[in-house]
Image (cartoon, helix red, strand yellow):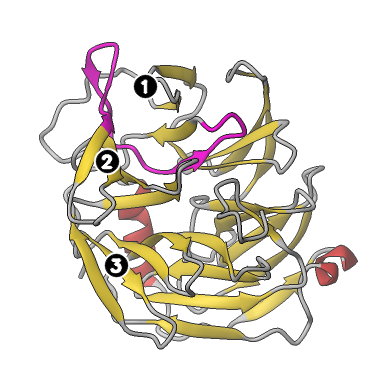
Amino acid sequence: MIVRILTGTMGVALLFSTLAAQPPKREFSLQADSPKFWELVEKDAQLKTVGSGFGFTEGPVWEPGGSVIVSDEQTNELFRLFPDGHHESILKLGDPDGNTRDSQQRLIVTASVLRALIRLSPDERGYAVIADRYKGARLNSPNDVTLGPDDALYFTDPTLDLVKGEKQEIPFQGVYRLGKDGNLTLLTRDMAQPNGLAFSPDGRYLYVDDTERRNIWRYAFRPNGTVEDGVQFADEKSDGLPGVPDGMKVDRQGNLYVTGPGGIWVWSPEGQRLGRILLPSTAANLTWGDLDRLTLWITAGHYVYTLKMKASGYLPYADPKEVK
């Protein structure tokens, strides 16, 4: 049994419960809803387990040397997973969740127990809190974060990991922008439990999923760092398989890859479901890896998987020697 100290019954608690309840054996498969799905991945692509022995993996960030940083929400640590499969602890931290790099390649972490967005020091032995309050009130439990087209940081702040007994000081669950000047602004409070988020490669749209309502929203992004014209882009209602909308990424064509029931749901820029990547364990997040961005790295419960793709992924924080 996996025990979490949370308020409510959603979010990571829901993911943990579905992980515990799922059958001991599920098979990997690729399920196409459109012929376009096979333009993104080979029909005979094979899932590879590259890491195991974790508690609950989240927030993968691939590194040019071939390793990947992952959060473990059960052991409360950040790990570095190496190509040979072994992993080493980087930092003990209360419930690390989503991670990204900023425009200077520094690691940014959503630290739910701290109720803060933090930046790791260059030696990875410490951190600085870069956002923990909005208009004087403590944030809820920051969940996921991404770098925006304007080099600002954008993050979600649901109550999914709010520690039991602690007071919610902000009366809503929001999506925020943290400017390079340190100014924190609210973008939207439309969603019940905002979670994963990603920008389209051209920077025109911001996508955010809502774990509680199990749908995905799309907002028009403006050069001044605001959003408008929010519309429901897609929904991922359960069809009996475990999993909820959580982490998301986009490829260079603008297709959206979102965790959901059974694994990863793949959406076209127009909102058509192209197919699903069905996984042996419940997926929580994903990222693109390798210098050509042709590999999906997937965090799923105790495991980290990789899947070779035909589609090339997009990451806004790519190192100069990598393909954005």
Between the residue at mark 3 and the residue at mark 1, the CA separation in whole angstroms equals 28 Å
Q: Mark 1 near mark 2, Cβ–Cβ under 8 Å?
A: no
Residue 71, quarter of the rendered image: bottom left
Left or right: 104 as drawn, with respect to 136: right
- What is the quadrant of residue 186 in the picture? top left
Residue 265 visible? yes
Q: Residues within 10 Å of mark 3 (few under 14, many from 20)?
A: many
**Residue 144 located within the stretch drawn in magenta:** yes
Picture coordinates of residue 295 (x, y %)? Answer: 63, 72
Q: Amino acid at mark 2?
A: Gly
Q: Quadrant of residue 82?
A: bottom left
Task: Please tell me which of labels 3 and 1 falls first in the chain.
Answer: 3
The location of residue 298, given as percent across then percent down, is: 51, 68
Q: Which residue is mark 1?
A: 182
Q: On screen, 293 above or below 189?
A: below
- Asked whether the beta carbons under mark 2 and mark 3 sit within 8 Å of each other, the answer is no
Residue 8's label in the rendered image is 2
Q: Which residue is mark 3?
A: 79
Q: Residue 178: x and y, percent?
A: 42, 26
Q: Residue at x 41, y 88 (%)?
A: 84
